[in-house]
Amino acid sequence: MPGSRTGRPPVQRTVRRPAASSRPPRDNPVRRLCTRAQKAWDRPLTAYYLIFGGSLLITVLGLVMVYSASQITALQMSLPGSFFFRKQFLAASIGGALLLVASRMPVKLHRGLAYPILAGAVFMMALVQVPGIGMSVNGNQNWISLGGSFQIQPSEFGKLALVLWGADLLARKQDRKLLAQWKHMLVPLVPVAFMLLGLIMLGGDMGTAIILTAILFGLLWLAGAPTRLFVGVLSIAATLGVILIKTSPNRMARLQCIGATDPGPGDACWQAVHGIYALASGGIFGSGLGASVEKWGQLPEAHTDFIFAVTGEELGLAGTLSVLALFAALGYAGIRVAGRTEDPFVRYAAGGVTTWITAQAVINIGAVLGLLPIAGVPLPLFSYGGSALLPTMFAIGLLIAFARDEPGARAALAMRHPRFGRKRGAGGSAFDRSPRRWNTMRRRASAARPSGER
């Protein structure tokens, strides 16, 4: 081997290759996105934001669609084109105030309102049957005239009354460990619910009675009713429903219109078929806001019970799926609030409100799609009708208050500080309660001063 210039043999250097295991693993972007979404979904304030944001978007979009769907109907009645929109906007403004008040009320005050709201709802529902006070709309005697063009439907407030009163009743019985006995679980919840159902059915409003029945079953399910008891009550309700449907030619005709594609003899299925026509002509992105054809006298109740059909025609499949996604998010948030709380009243009330809104949305949308009989119930927060909007927005305020009252949400809200507002906390001088931005600047200035300077 030839030597080097120094006379020493050359040193053979070995090239070190990095081990394959030392390379950092490649991060999957899809997995990273899913992880971030899961973390954001599990945050304490997720339910709060979903309820508040979802209900706000549904209400605003509903106002837009009420204005679009009701213009032709108003002009046909020799009224201004914005007549129904202005009334709905007024109801939404009052409902927004009720929502804010309900969201700031403590749970004890909500429980205290249970019996007064129930008594008021029963009294108004009884007044409906008094000649000269109650009035009939579309064949249902469930309205009270307030003068002029303003009317009120007391049965809508019966839903809120049953939720609050039933939640308070079941919570007090659970505290006393009485729900293990079937008598205490059924009495007086079921008799009072049947009394409300009887007052509603006196006016012939089958749709509202179905929603009230769904709320009752929701409360019983949350209370842990045994299967035999649950099936027994369900059988009684189903038997009564079949009797009421078979004894009414109008309800039998609506039942026969499920899945109809032709108006039939005498145009018995006219509304159901034209609802399908409106959805079918919308396509993916719709014909454009305000460009509906079916609302020009072809589709009855375009701004109330069948506003979802007009939405599908003008906003297309994208618009209807957006509405469905908002209701799904609202329902998930309500279930989450009911499942994470330790307060039995909050659990029953949140579950009852979620059952109410979800069942009513499913019945309305199912009727428009031709999958269920037309029950005559509005789409919550979306359809025209102040009597339905006011108690529903108060119920949304209940959910917001319950979502804010969760232990994790309370801690998250307590840690939040307004960016330019005053710092939260008791005590302290006025200098300490100055805006946070000036506090930061003051700390920087004091840190830059020499130690001997005052």
Image (cartoon, rainbow, N blue to C red):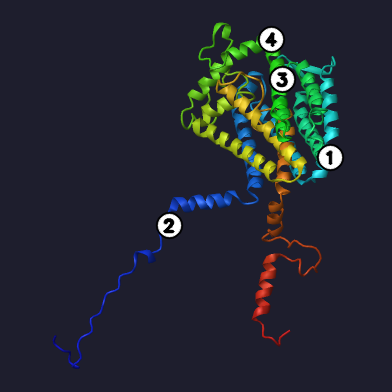
Q: Amino acid at mark 3?
A: Ala
Pointers 2 and 3 in contact (C-beta within 8 Å): no
Q: Which residue is located at x 50 percent, y 15 percent?
A: 261
Q: Which residue is located at x 69 percent, y 18 percent?
A: 238
In the drawing, does residue 195 fall left or right of residue 85? right
Q: Amino acid at mark 1?
A: Arg
Q: Position of residue 376 (x, y in %)?
A: 66, 21
- Residue hosting label 4: 248
Q: Nearer the viewer, mark 1 or mark 3?
A: 1
Look at the picture and state if 440 lies above or below 322.
below
Look at the picture and state if 423 lies above or below 245.
below
Q: Nearer the viewer, mark 3 or mark 4?
A: 3
Label 2 to label 3: alpha-carbon separation? 56 Å
Choose the circle earlier in sequence order: 4 or 2.
Answer: 2
Q: Position of residue 217 (x, y in %)?
A: 71, 28
Q: Nearer the viewer, residue 391 or 114?
A: 114
- Residue hosting label 2: 27
- Residue hosting label 1: 176
- Residue hosting label 3: 237
Q: Nearer the viewer, residue 194 or 19?
A: 19
Choose the circle earlier in sequence order: 2 or 3.
Answer: 2
Circle 3 — which element? helix
Q: Amino acid at mark 2?
A: Asp
Q: Position of residue 91 (x, y in %)?
A: 72, 33
Q: Nearer the viewer, mark 2 or mark 1?
A: 1
